[in-house]
Amino acid sequence: MFARTQEVLLNTSAQLSLPLYLPDDETFASFYPGENAALLAALQVMLDREHGSYLYFWSRKGGGRSHLLHAACAALSARAKAVGYVPLDKRTWFVPEVLEGMEQLALVTIDNIECIVGDPPWEMAIFNLYNRIQETGRTRLIISGNCPPRQLNLSLPDLASRLDWGQIYRLQPLSDEEKGYALQMRAKLRGFEFPEDVIRFLLKRLERDMRTLSATLDQLDHASIRAQRKLTIPFVKAILNL
């Protein structure tokens, strides 16, 4: 997966910085909508507005949450807006104080909020950021989780109630057929064909979440370029040791 790096400098006493990594191919154009038209429309309206707003969406792991957050960041970055992406599944890389000053950004996205359930410093940091964003009224805030806010079992009740106030959507899972369409769409955007028989083969042999399937697409694309070969089932078997 190719990535570009944007460093977001935060106004904190510790002079912290959080590098923002946006995969080049995780944009709205490469996201297959399935039954998520309402969520995508809400995100587009939110990003087009100049004032602050809040949206929460949830799905199981591998359902496309990170893709949509990356896409939102990419969309505003393309307009020269300052954005922040906070992947809480990687919170060991940074400290809660990294959120200080983020209310000055045009967009803040917080991924995998379920990862800080029962962690008081992180819960309080997100609660305080939410309140600062509401006070300034300029920042768009998007949070993703693996369940609705009220089911997170947060130890800070006030944070649970705050997260439940705004727009809340479930990111609907794709059917196997739709996953095939999504893979073909991403392949075409990258300039190669992903044969239907290969896709059916992969759906039978691999974990069928889109994160796994997309990573496999990247691996096969690179292998195909190196070997100067088209994607066939025998070639895929050899590359993936299936």
Image (spheres, rainbow, N blue to C red):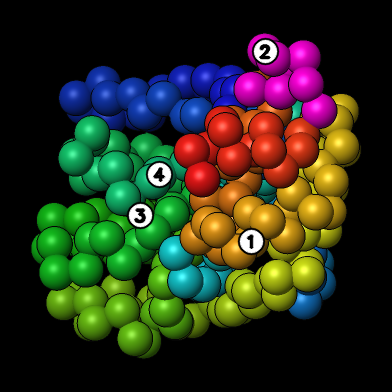
Tell which tag, 3 or 2, sits nearer the viewer.
2
Range covered by the magenta-colored residues: 223-230
Mark 1 residue type:
Leu
Graded by Cα atoms within 10 Å as few (under 14), some (14 to 19) or many (20 or more), the crowding at tag 1 reads: some
Please tell me which residue is depicted at 34% across the width and 24% down the height of the picture: 17
Does label 4 or label 2 sit earlier along the sequence?
A: 4
Can you tell which quarter of the image residue 182 is in? bottom right
Please tell me which residue is depicted at 64% across the width and 22% down the height of the picture: 223
The residue beneath circle 1 is: 203
Does label 4 or label 3 sit earlier along the sequence?
A: 4
Q: Nearer the viewer, residue 139 or 47?
A: 47
Whole-angstrom CA distance, mark 1 to mark 3, is 41 Å
Tell which tag, 4 or 2, sits nearer the viewer.
2
* Position above or below: 223 against 213: above
Whole-angstrom CA distance, mark 4 to mark 3, is 12 Å
Circle 4: element type: strand
Mark 3 residue type:
Leu
Does label 3 or label 2 sit earlier along the sequence?
A: 3
Residue 169 appears in the rendering: yes
Tell which tag, 4 or 3, sits nearer the viewer.
4
Tags 3 and 2 touching, CB below 8 Å: no
Can you tell which quarter of the image residue 128 is in? bottom left
The residue beneath circle 3 is: 129
The residue beneath circle 4 is: 86
The residue beneath circle 2 is: 226
Graded by Cα atoms within 10 Å as few (under 14), some (14 to 19) or many (20 or more), the crowding at tag 2 reads: few
Tell which tag, 1 or 3, sits nearer the viewer.
1
* Position above or below: 182 against 169: above
Circle 2: element type: helix
